[in-house]
Image (cartoon, rainbow, N blue to C red):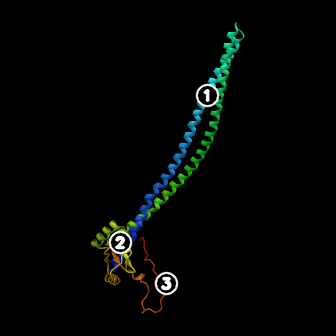
């Protein structure tokens, strides 16, 4: 019975370690994904700033072309002004020159506003690019770390799998089946009885059960059905027959959960 209990406890420790490793392995891609998302966002900001700068460039090229056209028009009108015949003609031409000057001024203001926007976008682009650089380096580091960790986890898992196989061979199929069913349903298949309680579900144990457990029996919890065992190493205090109590000997020291291997 004692060997069975020890093997089941060992199996449970292995299963819990495997679950912990599997959980950590499942969380690894999220770390990379988060860094990838941050980098992608910075790249989008850089691309947006770059596109905005291109639009301003295109806009200013058009504005300059239009400004030049108005200047040439004004120059042509000034030449015509030299050969006008009537004051009405002169007035009409003056009006055209004035209009061209006004348009030139308006377009120059637009160009100035575009230059101001360009300055803002250039700062945004520089900021986004330095972010891209930092985040790309950080992503590289995270990928490398995640890879190393994954390999470590794989190696640890392989060791646990080997220990698991070994210990399962030592347990009779009926007990294994019962343990597996409980572990699948409740997360753990075997629980320590401590202070007359099942540590799996915290329900109190009947005195009869408690006594039988202390005799070394493997029982089931009435409440959660987990297999129940008592660990003599966790007995609260040595009884009178051993008068010289070793300090700390009665302390609740956890049974070592060897991960095997
Ligand atoms: Zn229980």
Label 1 environment density (alpha carbons within 10 Å; few <14, some 14–19, many ≥20): few
Mark 1: secondary structure:
helix
Where in the figure is residue 204, as x and y percent of width and height? 36, 78
In the picture of the structure, the residue carrying the numbered disc 3 is 248
Label 1 C-beta lies within 8 Å of the nearest ligand 1 atom:
no
Give 26 or 125, whichever is nearer the viewer: 125
Label 2 environment density (alpha carbons within 10 Å; few <14, some 14–19, many ≥20): some
Mark 3: secondary structure:
loop
Residue shown at the point (67%, 26%) measured from the top left: 105
> Is 195 on the left-hand or right-hand side of 58?
left
| Quadrant location, the N terminus | bottom left
In the picture of the structure, the residue carrying the numbered disc 2 is 167
Residue shown at the point (42%, 61%) measured from the top left: 23
| Quadrant location, the C terminus | bottom left
Query: What is the number of callouts on the image?
Result: 3
Query: Nearer the observer, disc 2 or disc 1?
Result: 1
Identify the disc placed on residue 61. 1
Q: Quadrant of residue 106?
A: top right
Label 2 C-beta lies within 8 Å of the nearest ligand 1 atom:
no
């Amino acid at each position: 019975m004692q060997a069975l209990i020890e093997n089941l406890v060992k199996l449970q420790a292995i299963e819990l370690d495997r679950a912990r490793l599997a959980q950590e392995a499942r969380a690894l891609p999220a770390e990379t994904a988060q860094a990838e998302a941050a980098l992608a966002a910075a790249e989008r900001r850089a691309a947006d700033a770059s596109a905005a700068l291109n639009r301003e460039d295109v806009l200013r090229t058009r504005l300059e072309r239009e400004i030049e056209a108005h200047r040439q028009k004004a120059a042509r009108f000034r030449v015509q002004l030299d050969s006008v015949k009537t004051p009405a003609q002169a007035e009409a031409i003056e009006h055209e020159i004035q209009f061209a000057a006004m348009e030139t001024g308006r377009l120059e203001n637009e160009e100035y506003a575009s230059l101001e926007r360009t300055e803002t976008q250039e700062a945004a682009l520089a900021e986004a690019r330095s972010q891209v650089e930092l985040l790309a380096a950080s992503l590289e580091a995270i990928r490398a770390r995640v890879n190393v960790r994954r390999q470590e986890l794989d190696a640890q898992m392989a060791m646990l799998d080997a220990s698991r196989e070994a210990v399962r061979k030592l347990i009779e199929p009926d007990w294994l089946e019962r343990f597996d069913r409980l572990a699948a349903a409740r997360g753990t298949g075997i629980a320590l009885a401590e202070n007359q309680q099942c540590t799996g579900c915290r329900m109190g144990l009947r005195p009869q059960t408690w006594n039988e457990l202390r005799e070394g029996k493997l029982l089931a919890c009435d409440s959660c059905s987990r297999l129940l065992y008592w660990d003599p190493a966790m007995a609260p205090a040595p009884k009178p027959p051993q008068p010289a109590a070793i300090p700390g000997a009665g302390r609740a020291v956890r049974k070592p959960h060897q991960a095997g291997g």
